[in-house]
Amino acid sequence: MATTGADRSMQAISPEGNLPLVRRLEAVGFRAWPAASVVYDGSWQIRLTGGHPSKRLNCVVPLDPSDYRDADLRIEKARKRFEHYGRQLVVRETPLAPAPLIARLEADGWEAFETVSVMTADLSSLELPDMIGHLPTHDMGRFIDALLLVEDEDPALKPVLAEILTAIKPATGLFIAENPGEPAQAVTLCVQDNDLAGILSFAVAQQRRRQGIGTEMLTAALRWAGISGARTAWLQVVVDNAPALHLYRRFGFREAYQYRYWRQADGA
């Protein structure tokens, strides 16, 4: 039997492990970076956050490979909801997405435009220092200011970032690398959810890259996570971010699965 484009797309993001692992990592990912509005259409999670452009906060995520019922109608309902927020409809394809849905999107002229690797590492196998080189801060406003500066983001995003961070229910570690009187050099957000710890918002200032700051920050966050009770760390990284992938692999991170985003192509 010939392999279709949709079949190839599903093979490309299939997990090396099993679907229960994907479901668990997806669940902790939702809790670690919560959207302002979350509704369900069957097993499809519809995530929207009006004040922030993050794709993870503004997408439809199908979570059951068998849930393809009335897909055209449900896509159209989701499109109207996104239009109400002034956003283009985006579908996030994980190994939990129904293959017929992805095939239909492809046939209707949709395009996949970003692929992300979800990686995990066994914290017990890492050789981390006994001391934490950078202690987490409790000053959320200071952390957000540093995050916006390091990532060169619009300062107008500060209120919605404060809402997102406040909405995170699991324990959080907010890390900033800085010297007195100087701008922030790097930031890391670590969310410790039972035995899993997620590394989010990990960024190093452009002028401080390849100087060891990223290694210091990642070490501190993982050490904090281990002390807090985590046994496995996870993170998400765009597959063409070679420097980040190199750093994460040095820390023992290995790919668990991939996901990618779909949107309707212009003129389709």
Image (tube, grey):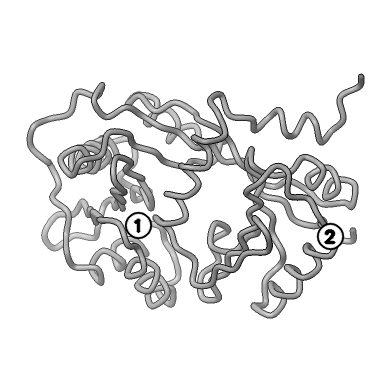
Q: Quadrant of the N terminus?
A: top right
Callout 1 amino acid: Val
**Residue closest to the far left:** 131
Identify the image quadrant of residue 221: top left
Residue that appears at 69% across and 55% down: 91
Left or right of 82? Residue 194 is: left
What residue is pinned by disc 2?
266
Marks 2/1: CA distance?
Answer: 32 Å
Callout 2 amino acid: Asp
Residue that appears at 47% across and 55% down: 30
Q: Quadrant of the C terminus?
A: bottom right
Residue 11 locus on image (x, y percent): 71, 28
Identify the image quadrant of residue 90: bottom right
Task: Return the mark for residue 115.
Answer: none
Disc on the earlier residue, 2 or 1: 1
Residue 181 locus on image (x, y percent): 13, 63
* Element assignment for label 2: loop
What residue is pinned by disc 1?
150
* Element assignment for label 1: helix
Of 64 and 58, which appears nearest the observer?
Answer: 64
Residue that appears at 49% across and 72% down: 36
